[in-house]
């Protein structure tokens, strides 16, 4: 470095020597502090304003990335009309969301209405308990007494649990409200995805520029890796969960399972958190055996087993190679997202945590390769130098 430049830089770093220089320095420091404070306040206010929409926008971006391939095919079939293709993707997405929701919601409402009518007409009969129940340890006597009361007078048995039933009713109403909000957010996210798809190239270029500013030369590579992770998780985890829940819901609607919509939602939740869907389907199959013919029950049991085991061949087909995200990461992301943002957070959390895990492991692998290269040739420059 030139000697004059060195001296000049040292003068810049040295403290002010005269009162005038000290006054100028204090003025500039005060101005910088005010500007940084105002900038921080502006960023904070902007964040607070957009905070309610962050999860929905992120979910819209995820949907856009996951559906880019079918969008490109539709765009080619339409002769290169991106806006029309984006509009068709919105319509298809809304149909895939609304039609099953309406069918399963109608089933839930019908079941609730029938249950209310049967309770009012005292048409629900509870069989008396077996004598062996009374000998069960700890809970045997109380359960036998309650079961006997319910078999003789169900209404009187329910009155004993009036406070708990009221709390359960409040919780159910609240849950239905949250589901309604979640459904609306899904609709908004689908619309956002349809708007983003025609601008995919510009959005990708912008993401690469931002990533390059933050991470350096590997920005474009990390954006590509993030997009691949999003596609892998949405298709291999969320896509499989949606397929399993829809197939399970159709089977329950065909055999007339009460509250099929609620059971289908439970199947979806269990599948997203990577637990076996048979945890939900086996009790439903047992119920079908108790109320329907043997032929129908056996067919539904076979259908339930097929649905429960379908993820074993659907995941390898949809997830793709080289995207092995641990199931614990998906589980934690789904549960944490659900606790934070409700039903939409269930999906966003799983994808976001999977992407974060993928980028973190990629960074670790790159650091290990750099260390190995430096150990092999200490004189060679590395990317981190």
Image (spheres, rainbow, N blue to C red):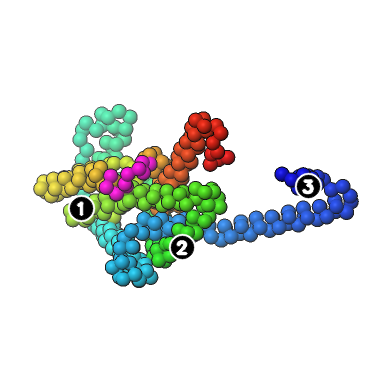
Q: What label sits on residue 4 in the rendered view? A: 3
In the image, is residue 317 part of the stretch drawn in magenta? Answer: yes
Q: Nearer the viewer, mark 1 or mark 3?
A: 3
Secondary structure of the residue carrying numbered label 1: helix
- Residues at marks 3 and 2, CA–CA distance in whole angstroms: 46 Å
Q: Nearer the viewer, residue 99 or 207?
A: 207
Image location of residue 81, percent across then percent down: 35, 71
Residue that label 2 marks: 202
Q: Quadrant of the C terminus?
A: top right
Q: Which of marks 3 and 2 is nearer the N terminus?
A: 3
Q: Residue at x 45, y 40 (%)?
A: 361
Image location of residue 337, percent across then percent down: 44, 48
CB atoms at circles 2 and 1 under 8 Å apart?
A: no
Q: Which of 322 and 327 is in front in this view?
A: 322
Q: What label sits on residue 251 in the rendered view? A: 1
Rendered view: 343 above or below 80: above
In the image, is residue 258 part of the stretch drawn in magenta? Answer: no
Q: Residue at x 89, y 51 (%)?
A: 19
Question: How many numbered marks have been drawn onto this rendered protein structure?
Answer: 3
Q: Which of marks 1 and 3 is nearer the N terminus?
A: 3
Label 1: how many Cα within 10 Å (few below 14, some 14–19, many 20+): many
Q: Quadrant of residue 197?
A: bottom left
Rendered view: 311 above or below 207: above
Q: Nearer the viewer, residue 340 or 206?
A: 206
Image location of residue 8, percent across then percent down: 78, 48
Residue numbers of the magenta segment: 316-325
């Amino acid at each position: 470095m030139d000697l004059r430049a060195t001296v000049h830089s040292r003068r810049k770093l040295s403290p002010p020597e005269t009162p005038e220089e000290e006054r100028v320095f204090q003025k500039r420091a005060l101005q910088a502090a005010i500007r940084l404070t105002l900038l921080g306040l502006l960023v904070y206010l902007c964040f607070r304003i957009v905070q309610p929409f962050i999860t929905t926008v992120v979910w819209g971006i995820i949907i856009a990335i996951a559906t880019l391939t079918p969008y490109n095919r539709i765009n080619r079939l339409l002769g290169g009309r991106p806006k029309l293709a984006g509009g068709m993707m919105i319509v298809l997405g809304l149909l895939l969301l609304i039609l099953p929701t309406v069918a399963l919601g109608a089933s839930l409402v019908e079941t609730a209405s029938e249950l209310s009518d049967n309770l009012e007409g005292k048409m629900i009969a509870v069989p008396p308990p077996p004598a062996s129940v009374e000998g069960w340890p700890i809970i045997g006597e109380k359960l036998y007494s309650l079961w006997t009361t319910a078999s003789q007078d169900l209404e009187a048995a329910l009155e004993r649990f009036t406070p708990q039933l009221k709390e359960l009713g409040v919780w159910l109403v609240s849950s239905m409200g949250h589901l309604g909000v979640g459904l609306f957010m899904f609709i908004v996210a689908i619309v956002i995805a349809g708007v983003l798809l025609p601008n995919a190239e510009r959005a990708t270029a912008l993401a690469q520029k931002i990533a390059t500013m933050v991470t350096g030369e590997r920005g474009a590579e990390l954006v590509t890796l993030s997009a691949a992770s999003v596609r892998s998780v949405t298709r291999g985890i969320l896509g499989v969960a949606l397929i399993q829940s829809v197939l399970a819901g159709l089977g329950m609607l065909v055999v007339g399972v009460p509250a099929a919509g609620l059971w289908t939602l439970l199947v979806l939740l269990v599948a997203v958190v990577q637990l076996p869907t048979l945890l939900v389907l086996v009790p439903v199959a047992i119920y079908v055996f108790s109320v329907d013919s043997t032929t129908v029950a056996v067919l539904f049991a076979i259908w339930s087993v097929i649905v429960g085991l379908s993820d074993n061949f659907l995941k390898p087909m949809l997830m793709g190679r080289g995207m092995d995200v641990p199931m614990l990461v998906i589980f934690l992301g789904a549960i944490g997202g659900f606790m934070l943002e409700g039903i939409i957070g269930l999906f966003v959390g799983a994808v976001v945590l999977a992407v974060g895990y993928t980028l973190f492991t990629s960074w670790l692998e790159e650091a290990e390769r750099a260390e190995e290269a430096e150990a092999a040739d200490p004189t060679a420059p590395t990317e981190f130098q």
